[in-house]
Amino acid sequence: MADENPNSPYRKVGIVGGGTAGYLTALALKKQIPHLEVTVVESESIPVIGVGEATTPLIVMFLHQGLGLDAAEFYRVVQPTWKLGIKFEWGLPGDYAFHYPFDRNDSWNAIQQTGDIRNGCLTSVFMKNDKSHMLRSAGGSKLTPIHNKTNYAYHLENECFIGYLRSKLKDAGVEMRLGTIQEVKLNEAGTAIDHLFSPELGNLSFDLYVDCSGFRSVLLEKAMGSKFISYADSLYTDSAWTVTRPNNGQPKPYTTAVTMDHGWTWIIPVRTEDHLGYVYSSGFCDDESALAEMKRKYPDAIDPKLVKFRVGRHEQAFVGNVMSVGNSFGFVEPLESTGIHMIISTILEFVRNFPKSDNDVTSRQTINTTTNATWDNIRWFLGVHFRFNKRFETEFWKTCREKVDISGFETIRQLFYEKGPFLENGIDENPDYRHLGRYTIFPWNAFDLFMLGQGELPHEVATKIPAKTRGDLANKAVVWDQIQLRALPQNEALAAIDTWPSLVGSRN
Ligand SMILES: Cc1cc2nc3c(=O)[nH]c(=O)nc-3n(C[C@H](O)[C@H](O)[C@H](O)COP(=O)(O)OP(=O)(O)OC[C@H]3O[C@@H](n4cnc5c(N)ncnc54)[C@H](O)[C@@H]3O)c2cc1C
C-alpha cells in the first residue's frame, strides 16, 4: 500500500521528463499520495518521442477511475477513437487475417464451428464489420453504448494527449520547471543521487528522483549505471518509418498490424487520418528500401519520419533513490501497444510499494521483481508473433521462424501442444498452471489465439475437447451477427458522443 505517512523521509519527488511517462507519474503520485511535493523538470530543447498512440484497456480505467479525469471532457479535448482490439494481417499467406479483441475470444470453437477464428466473441464480430460498440435500439430512436460489457482502449493523437495531461498538472498541485538536466551529482558512495544541475535552474535537490527522460535514460542508465539488457535475440526490429494518410473521417475501430517484407506496419486510425508506422530490422533492410516499400504499399502516405530504437530493459527500475518509468527503463516494439500500458502498470506498482525510507529494501525488490518479470514476459509473448508468422518467405521472416528466441515461453508452448487449446481444456482455470501466468499482461486465451491464429495446432486436439464445450458457439455467432447489425460505425458513434456527452458510459 502507498505510504501516506506525512512524516515519511520521502516528501520531495523530482520527475525528469515531460512526456507521457512524466506527466502520468506526476498525476498519479499527487492523486494517491497527496502529501508528496511533486516537481516535473522538462527540457524545452529535447522533444518528446511523439509516438505512442495505440493503447490497451488499462488506460480507460487508469485515466477516469484512477486519476479521476472526467471522460466527457477527455473526449471533447483529446478526441480519442476507440480501439476494440488489433486486426492482424498475419500468420498465414493470402488475404487471411485474425483478430486479437480485448474480450475473451473462443478461438478454437470459432474455427471448428464457424470456420472463422474472428467469430470468437461479440467484440471480434464488431471488428469484422467495422462497427463500434454503440447500439441503436430496435426502433432506431435510442442509442446505448455497451461500454460496460465490452473491453476497449483508445487511439490517441500523441501531441494532443500530452497537451491535455500537461493542462491537468497545475490543478493537481504539481510544480513545473523548464530546464535541461546537464549534470547528475551522486553522493560520495555513488549509491544515490545527491542533486541535479541544469543551466536554467541551477542545482535541484529532491528526496526521490523519477527518470522519465525517455530513451536517454539520463538518471537510471547514465548516472546510476543500471545495465541495459537487450531483447534483440527475440525481437529483431530497431527502426520505424512513420507516415499519415487521410481516412475520410471513417476511422476503423481497431489497430491493424500488417506483415511487411522486413517487419510490419501499424495502422492507427484517429478522427480524420490514419497514422502508420513501418517497423523493420536494419539488419535486413536499409532505411531507403524500407521507405520505398512503404510508399509502394501505401501510395497516399505522406510526411515520413524515421525513428530509431533499441529493444530491452534495464537491470533494475529502482536503484538507490531513483525510480524509472517509461522508455527510460524499457521498450519493446509496439506490436501489442505495450508502451503506455507498461507506463501505467509500473506507476501502479510504484505507488502500491512506495518506499518508506532509504532502508526499505523490500519495496524496491518488489517493484524490481514485478517490473522485470512483466517486461520479460512481454518479450517472450511478442517473440511468438514473429516465430510463427508464416505469411512471407523473405529472409527476415525465414530467419524469424528459425531463430527468434522464445525460450522463456517454452513451457507454455509445450503445454499448448500437449494440452491445448487452453480455454476449452480448462487450463486457464486450473490452479496447477497459475504460476505460469503470474507476471503476464496477456490472458490465457491470447496464447490460444496467437498459436491458432498463426496455424499452430495442439497434438490430438479433437479428441481432448469435451463434447459439451463444442455446442453453442455457432448459435452465439448468429446472435452476435444480429447485434452488430444495430451497431453504429465509429464515426457516427463518436459524433453522437460529441452531441450527447453522457453517452460515454458509466464505466468511465
Ligand atoms: C516507433 C515507436 C512506436 C510506438 N508506438 C507506441 C504505441 O502505439 N503505443 C504505446 O503505448 N507506446 C508506443 N511507443 C512507446 C512510446 O514512445 C511511449 O510509451 C511513450 O511515448 C512514453 O515516452 P516517455 O515519456 O518515456 O519518453 P518521451 O516521450 O521521449 O519523453 C521524454 C521526456 O524527457 C525529457 N528529457 C529528456 N532528457 C532530458 C534532460 N536531460 N533534461 C530534462 N528533460 C529531459 C524530454 O524533454 C521529454 O519531455 C512507441 C515507441 C516507438 C519508438
Image (tube, rainbow, N blue to C red):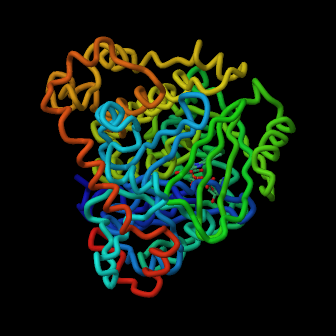
Relative height, residue 227 to residue 464 (above, below): below
Relative height, residue 246 to residue 263 (above, below): below
Q: Where, quadrant-wise, is the C terminus in this rendering?
A: bottom left
* Number of numbered labels in the structure image: 0
Q: Which residue is at 53% across, 54% downward?
A: 54
Relative height, residue 280 to residue 504 (above, below): above
Q: Which residue is at 26% across, 27% downward?
A: 422
Q: Which residue is at 34% across, 68% downward?
A: 31
Left or right relative to 334: residue 129:
left
Please state which of residues 460 and 371 is positioned toward the viewer in this rendering. 460
Relative height, residue 168 to residue 500 (above, below): above
Please state which of residues 310 and 365 is positioned toward the viewer in this rendering. 310
Left or right relative to 17: residue 508:
left
Please state which of residues 436 and 207 is positioned toward the viewer in this rendering. 436
Please identify the quarter of the rendering in which residue 3 is found: bottom left
Q: Is residue 376 visible?
A: no
Image location (x, y in percent) of residue 357? 31, 48
Please identify the quarter of the rendering in which residue 410 is found: top left
Image location (x, y in percent) of residue 141? 33, 85
Image location (x, y in percent) of residue 13? 44, 59
Image location (x, y in percent) of residue 79? 53, 74
